Amino acid sequence: MSETLFSGQTILLANSLLVSLLLFALWISDREQRHNLYWGGGLFAMFVVLATLPTEPPDTLSAGIALCVIASAVACTLLVQGTATFANKSLSARWLIASGLALILLFVILALSSYQGGILLATAVAAAFWFTAWTLRTYGFVEKIAAALFFIRGFMLVLAALTAEFSFTERFLNLSFISANQIVAMASALALLMVAFLANQRELERSRRLLRQGNLMAQRLGQLSDTASVVRESVKILLEEEPLSTAWIYRLDEKSQKLWMLDSGGRLAYLSRENTEIPLEGSVSGKAVHTGRVQLIDDLASDARVNRTARKLAHTHPKELAGTNIIIPLMSGDRVYGTCSYHLGLQRTLNQADFEAFEAIGQIIGLALASVDNLEEMTFRANHDSLTQLPNRAALHEAFRQHAKENPAHGATMFLLDLDKFKDVNDTLGHHVGDQLLKEIGPRLAQVAAPSKLMAARLGGDEFVCLLFKSLERAQATQLGREILEAVRARFSVDDLSLSIDGSIGISAAPRDGEDSHELLRCADVAMYQAKTTTTPVVAYNQSFDPHSRERLALMSELKASIGSEQLILHYQPKVHLASNRVSGVEALLRWKHPVHGMISPGTFIPMAEVSPMINELSLWVMEQAIAQAKLWSDLDLSVAINVSMRNLAEDTWYERAIGLIRESGIPAGKLELELTESVFMHAPDEVGRKLNAIAATGVRIAIDDFGTGYSSLNYLRKLPIHVVKIDKSFVMQLHENKADRQIVETILSLAEAMKLEVIAEGVEQEESLQLLRELGCDYVQGFHVGHPTEPTKLTTWIKERQWEAKAYGNQMNEAGAGGS
Ligand code: C2E
Ligand code: CA
Ligand code: CA
């Protein structure tokens, strides 16, 4: 060991060198290259120790001092790094601080055991350095503290010069050395203060810039009205701020407890599809959501908090993903809407202000998302039915408008579904069950809707609409309508109850039936009403049953005027009793000889009249005419049947007026027959039953018309005064060649037999069918093969001839029979 370890000159030189190194390091660190600061901090610490070294240390201690120099450098480096990282809230900081503390402890032991003064000072300085840096946790402040320490150092030297108590300062009394040393100390302190001041300025400037950016961001995001554009714009703004960065924005889904990626942008956006969902559990993003604080990840690959997918990604793309990552919770108030993973592209040290700025950015985006959400919620509510969550009437019209604008050539088909007897469900099982049932209709419609691209909407009550963005022919549309109805008819289970509900569907299509959705809806409504009043559950709109189309309206008023005029007449179609081969009766069928349009079929004008009260007048008029005709035919022993529409019986007083008419006429019992379709009984069966019983009490016979096309349930017949079942012509016209028809006819016949009802088959067009019906035991036939509807005078002649023939035939048979016996 030499006599002097360090001369005053050497210390001065080392001093100057270290100060300039430190300044250089700090200057570089301004570019936010953090590790330079660590070096700077380390060198600074070394300098502090060197500055306090005596020139004449006792020999035994030189090794300890050398150790001290190194240890203090390492300690400070670690501490500076630790505090810097700790400020950024990364986990590894704690380890760094712990090791720094351990080293300080080492100093303390060394100081106590030997070279007290200097080493204690070094320890104190290191501790002060660490403490300040730690409590302030910010980078700018570390610089300030460094400057403060230089002051302390200068002060110490002055003190050393003035007091002789410090034995080791004797050498320092050399004045030129002191002044030189002090000048250096003051200069370095000033320089450091400058650095600190400038850093402060910069920070101020930066926070101002962030404020401006925040404002700008709020402004830009505030103008947007949907989530997608808010997210897109947010990514754009984030990238503008950091040219090398990448931003991923995730949306929080509370239900699945996951974050789903909405959008991404920037340098590494191509990695996005690798991490489209992040579970909240066990992820840093999850922590950001739970704590509502910005999270920092310094090293994706090694941070245990990072979820596995991201970590894997960091391993496969180590170069790209190196750099600082921040997870910003996107919040408004206390609610977290999502997160933004922000990769800065560089390794960066972030101070408190940065964190606050990122938090503010998160809040601005969060607020924008919240207001868009509110807006979307409001729009959703305005456009959706609150019970079923289906689009509502307004949304339906809007969707149609949009579609018509974009694809004017496609047209559209509208299916209006109305549930049957839904009111009964509500009344008997309660609204709760009714609501539940309505809620299940939507998914069923959607299920039919999915492959055909239908839009399902609820208009209110028990009315739903399916809109197909394509015009379908009537037949095709009816087919699809049936599929929809099938889906609705399948059993529901509500509250352990197994329910089924039926419905009727009216169909309209653009441009065939109307140009806009309001017109389509009106037409579908007309068709739906038609479906309800007939036995056909799915009906495509047809002008003929539209009470509101202009031509129809004109025709309706003409029809009303024509009641009682020559334009309306009755034709009669004969019915033949098969056993006797006699004409046993006739059916009155209305004919309208229109002065301009010629003969109009009842298939056209009766449904028209049925949608207005006019049908009541019309039916009574027909009844009057038919009774008058029946009286004229009294010598022919004919019964006269008239058709009664469902609306007649639905009306409160019609049946009383009809009974009055029948009583007044004095027509013999059994000579008047009323034909009613099955649908009559489906609506308010009790009420209809009561009215029918009153009518039947006059001796009038009741027939079920078009039997087999409706619900085909004979159950209701038991409770009603029915005398005759009239097999619909659709089963009869091809009877001779169609096995299925034959089976149906046979079934109806055996049912009727069991219930002791007479059976008539209408629509007999072939001799073979007639023979078959005779064999099967049918009572009566009616049809073109027997006789067309004919005007009464002609028919009278025809019947007379025929009865005579039948009589002759009967006589012949009788004679043959008599001869044979
Ligand atoms: P409906 O009661 O089922 O009447 C039978 C219809 O079948 C009549 O048509 C008749 O001409 C037709 N028809 C008879 N035999 C045959 C056949 O062998 N083959 C075929 N293909 N058709 C046959 P129409 O006269 O055109 O009447 C149509 C419908 O108009 C009637 O059906 C009935 O529902 C209604 N209608 C007619 N007159 C009146 C009326 O005075 N009051 C009411 N409420 N409805 C009436
Ligand atoms: Ca009839
Ligand atoms: Ca019929």
Image (tube, rainbow, N blue to C red):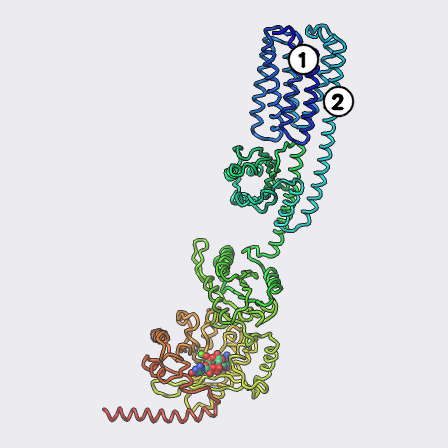
User: Residue 734 vs residue 184: left or right?
Assistant: left
Q: Residue furthest front?
A: 2
Per the image, the residue denoted by label 1 is 52
Residue 96 x, y percent position in the rendering: 57, 24
The label number, if any, that marks residue 190 in the structure image: 2
Q: Quadrant of the N terminus?
A: top right
Front residue of 200 and 338? 200
Q: Residue furthest left?
A: 821
Q: Do the residues labelled 2 and 1 touch (CB within 8 Å)?
A: no
Determine the CA span between mark 2 and mark 1. 20 Å
Residue 239 x, y percent position in the rendering: 64, 42
Residue 95 x, y percent position in the rendering: 56, 25
Front residue of 271 and 539? 271
Q: Could you tell me the amino acid type at mark 1?
A: Thr
Ligand 3: which quarter? bottom left
In the image, residue 662 sits, relative to residue 185, either above or below, namely below
